[in-house]
Amino acid sequence: MQALEDYKISPVTGCLLRQPTTPPPSLLPFKRLLEHSHALLSSGKLREAIEKLPSLDMAQLKNHEEKRLAHKILAFLAAQYVWQTGDGDPAEVSPFSQHFLRLRNVSFRVFFTEFIPSDQPNWLPFIEVTADIELSFCDGAKIMMHIIDSVKKNNIKTAIECLLKLGDVISIMRQQLLLLLSELKLKAPLTHSYGVLVRLLIEELDPKAFYCELRPYLSGWSHGKISKGLVYEGVPDSVLTGAETGDLSGQTIPKKRVYLGASAGQSVSLQSFDALLGIEHFKDVEAFFADLRKYMILEHRRFIEDLKKHVHLRDFVEGSASNELKTAYNSCVKELLLFRKDHLLIVEKFIIEPSKMYAAKVEGLKSQGTGGTGRLQVELINSSPFLTVE
């Protein structure tokens, strides 16, 4: 394993950029348009405004941070461009096709709150709380490196201490998850009990607003009238990012590309916890997570793959005679299981249940996560007793 910085994981902010960099001049018109996009979206004039944007000078994007910033701005604009009129008339051609091609190795996910229009209150909490969870992972990543070192040195005492700390980090992330899509942090600090948080979450939030207004913009190009994907003009069919799920080998002209929407499975934190703890999923779930890793930047993807390849924590625990070590390991596994179950509770309340009530309004969206998560719930119910070590 290399140092966290080699995987572009900051010791201060984890997988997030410490501070969004100042946009280069060529990117400023795109940033300004995004800041005012809500009004244009409401009036049905956003597509026209995007089509009038000047050409983006990619040569001005000098470093990784500027490229990630550009990708975030373009990703927000592209989602609004495609779904401006909802499922009734989505765009069939992706804007910024060639720009996305050149930025394909930077993160697909969108976390920067300063580019969310201030008059879109339903967006801000989603972005802010998701970022809070990612920031908490920063401590977890550093602890993971200490665990790896303790396994190499056969230092059981340090491994126990670090596993207990890692369990605490996952617990904090789990509590933050319950604030997702809400302004609950102003009303229920983390000292509240889990039950109180769940009740407040359900009482305070409007599932209809999320399902009908926000979710379509997070769902990629894989459903409804564009279930066969979008045309990426100017991008040769032979050039692939690795994340395509559509078939580009057929006779259809022009070719279309299918890309999944945003998903918690694209988070480095969840997949790296699985990799460190040696947790394996059903084959189809593993394949799904492998597909989602293609949406990560290369360094983050390599971090998870290196954990899978080089770290054998579960074997270390199973081969140890220390009951204290096994208890510490099991506590991490149980916290991670609770985190996933809480996430599925939110999926149930804000996607599955609203889909039954508002399907006619957003008929193209399936009753599953924006990235397509579905099977994991069955897996957690059926396999949870087998995840711990005895």
Image (cartoon, rainbow, N blue to C red):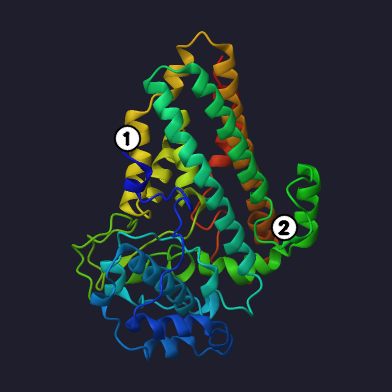
| Horizontal relation, residue 348 to residue 5: left or right | right
Q: Which quadrant holds the N terminus?
A: top left
Q: Which mark is residue 185?
A: 2
| Horizontal relation, residue 334 to residue 263: left or right | right
Query: Callout 1: helix, strand or loop?
Result: loop
| Tag 1 residue | 1
Q: From the viewer's perspective, is residue 104 above or below residue 141?
A: below
Q: Which quadrant holds the C terminus?
A: top right
| Horizontal relation, residue 9 to residue 351: left or right | left
| x then y, percent, for residue 332 | 57, 30
Q: Which mark is residue 23?
A: none
| Horizontal relation, residue 263 to residue 52: left or right | right
How many discs mark residues in the rendered view?
A: 2
Q: Mark 2: few, some, or many residues within 10 Å (few <14, many ≥20)?
A: some
Looking at the image, tell me whether mark 2 or mark 1 is earlier in sequence order.
Answer: 1
Q: Amino acid at mark 1?
A: Met
Front one among 371 and 343: 343
Alpha carbon distance from label 2 to label 1 = 36 Å
Q: From the viewer's perspective, is residue 87 above or below residue 274?
A: below
Q: From the viewer's perspective, is residue 249 above or below residue 38?
A: above
Front one among 137 and 354: 137
| x then y, percent, for residue 12 | 48, 51
Residue 363 in view, yes or no: no
Query: Callout 2: helix, strand or loop?
Result: helix
Place residue 122 in its image quadrant. Answer: bottom right
What residue is drawn where x is 49% and y is 67%?
Answer: 224
Q: Amino acid at mark 2?
A: Lys
What residue is drawn where x is 38% and y is 53%?
Answer: 296
| x then y, percent, for residue 252 | 26, 69
What residue is drawn where x is 40% and y is 83%?
Answer: 28
Residue 205 in view, yes or no: yes
